[in-house]
Image (spheres, rainbow, N blue to C red):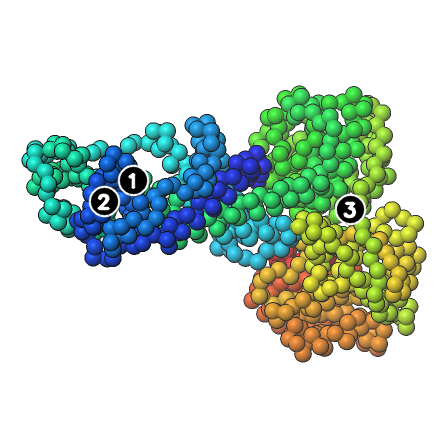
Amino acid sequence: MIRALHRWPGLLALVLVTILSLSGAALSVFPAAERLAAPQAETELTVATLADRIQLVYPGVEQIRRSPSGQITAYWFDQGTPGAAVIDPATGEGVASADPNQVERWITNLHRSLFLGDGGRIAMAAGAAAMLVLSLSGAALVARRTGGWRHWFAPLRGPLAGRLHVEIARIAVVGLLLSSTTALWMTASTFDLLPDGGAPPAFQAEVSNETGVALDRLAGLSEIPVADLRELSFPYPGDTTDVFTLKTDRGTGYLDQGDGALLAWADLTGWERVSETIYMLHTGQGAAVLGLVLGLMALGVPAMGATGVLIWLAGRRVRPRIRGNQPAGRAGTILLVGSEGGSTWGFAATLHAALTQAGQSVHVGPMSGFAPERYTRAERIILLAATYGDGAAPASAKGFLDRLNAFDRVPDMPIAVLGFGDRSFPAFCAFAKDVAAAAQAKGWPELLPLETVDRQSPQDFARWGRALGDALRIDLELSHQPVLPKTETLTLVSRRAYGAEVQAPTAILRFALPRVTLWQRLVGAGFARFEAGDLIGVLPEGSAVPRLYSLASARCDGFIEIVVKKHPGGLCSGQLTALEPGDTVTAFLRRNPGFRPGPSRAPLILIGAGTGIGPLAGFVRGNTRRRPIHLFFGMRHPKSDFFYGEELPAWQDEERLVRLVMAVSRVEHPHYVQDALRDDAAQVTRLIRDGARVMVCGGREMAAGVADTLAEILAPAGLTPAVLKAEGRYVEDVY
């Protein structure tokens, strides 16, 4: 909801908000420039002395004004001809023209009304309202992304466009909130939607009907410093009933031109002071430095607009455009999608096309938008649900389970759940299973039992489609061609071979970074940005199915590195381990944000065996902050598969690695990482009790053994791997 509230006002009002911000930033310069250019009055100078000096130079002076910048302007008539000038208060003489700055006037009219009068003012008020909504919703989204208001300035990760958007927002949001709220106040005041706030003072005494009092005899003027003056208007020559009108920072009063008596006075009301403060905060008049700061913050708006559009376009690329998508209220079949990387949307598009061709009316939307009250004509609901990380909801399914569990009564229409995942991961289709279990617990009628699609298999999808067709009594053939991310050609620059002695050929392969375009860098596409622990998908020759490998390097390392073991009959692993420098592979990048060390300074316990050392070595290599890292590494034999055997001691010397514990299994007395953990149970328990994060990478059997061992040694401390997982302190990357 908050994301939609942020996205659509931003997109719809982008032009208006950009004009407002750029013109406002330009206007913020003028008060500061005027302050620097205007001659300033000395501290002790009084209004009476200033008026006397000006009157000597310009006998026909009618009015003296002082702007918030300190600039003094005099207006006079000389033999019927009007004149005006910026005054040097030290001499009373004019030093510059008082004609308005035409550039400033033009920008002001653009900023206030787009040169369109009241209609333009309403349009710009709508832009200010959009900016207010954007600022409030954006602040909430920044807090959500950084983990709460207390972590407002926490380091960011992700594509450059997204990071720039948030970095600018969390600095500029205060200024934008201030500018937008004050703009709306001033618009309301312009259209008389707010009280006037004050009235001119009423005369408490009659005028003397005399003229010609000397200015230095006007007690009211000789006691007021020029710094407090706003405006002094002189009586009309020859009119004995006219008076001096004095306006100061304190209020407004009238002085008799015959004897200088104060005829009436009215202090500024509280409402007037509030209005003037808001005017000052919005325009910078009287607070030039604040105006410049707000102007600089306003310049963040076009930058955030550009990066916001890039983020939106990147998101739209993930979700395919579905032609003929019916409104939710008119569709017989509701098809909801839970996807993280976007591939599940492709399956949804294929299913939508096939059902539509079979005569069905279908609506496709995200699971996060689940709203049964809108499905007035629906006869069934189909859920296509991927899984994120270790069983979590993917991006487009956030909040679905909470909404489902909150319902007292589920819809009468039957439901079918199809899960998408990779069977090599322990949390295979875990989210889809949770959804199916929750629906069953609520008594939701079942159209089809839960089914799964492994590694985007078109065959699995087609088989499920035939079952769905049978349930709907229609012919349904689903022919899906998975759309892979855009691939890059990677060139091998070096390799290190291991494992031949134990019949387990393994290689550390290092590839050159591919060329990255500016667009890729802005949106984070391709290999523009990656971290150790992310995944690289390699397309082997002779197959359209990619194989995924964990990265042992980050973008800042300047290369792409993986550790690959040759599996008997393995198509991809066989091709990779046979590569020589200069050879190329076709690959793409897939984020794996669930397997990252995180920004904390708490100790890290890294546990890996075999090629599972790859991402763990990447974490150690990137530990320039010298976070305490304890590495438990299982291998067959140091002479055959001590991967990174040259780097690990050097990393210890550089304090990137605190301790290395090796477990060797192909020796007289076999030792596994589970045994190493038991041997070091006291220190492992102490580290975890003190907040350490545990990261496990390797085969499923090893990971299961590690979990059992940790459960055993942590039991006396009242901790379990399950509790650590719930706290986000135990993560696995298992294959």
Q: Is residue 406 visible?
A: no
Judging by the rendered image, the residue that carries numbered circle 3 is 485
Q: Gap between marks 3 and 1, in whole Å?
A: 72 Å
Image spot of residue 311 (x, y percent): 64, 44
First of labels 2, 1 by sequence position? 2
Q: Is residue 336 above or below residue 282?
A: above
Task: Single out the residue that lies furthest toward the front.
Answer: 79
**Quadrant including the N terminus:** top right
Q: Which amino acid does label 3 sit on?
A: Pro
Q: Which amino acid does label 2 sit on?
A: Tyr
Q: What residue type is labelled 1?
A: Gly
Image spot of residue 715 (x, y percent): 62, 63
Image spot of residue 612 (x, y percent): 77, 63
Image spot of residue 626 (x, y percent): 61, 71
Identity of the residue drawn at 75% across and 34% down: 348
Q: Which of marks 3 and 2 is in front?
A: 2
First of labels 3, 2 by sequence position? 2
Q: Can residue 644 be seen in this view?
A: yes
Identity of the residue drawn at 83% across and 54% down: 489
Task: Name which quarter of the figure residue 407 lies in.
Answer: top right
Judging by the rendered image, the residue that carries numbered circle 1 is 83
Classed neighbour count for the residue bearing mark 2: other residues with Cα under 10 Å, few (<14), some (14–19), many (≥20): many
Judging by the rendered image, the residue that carries numbered circle 2 is 58
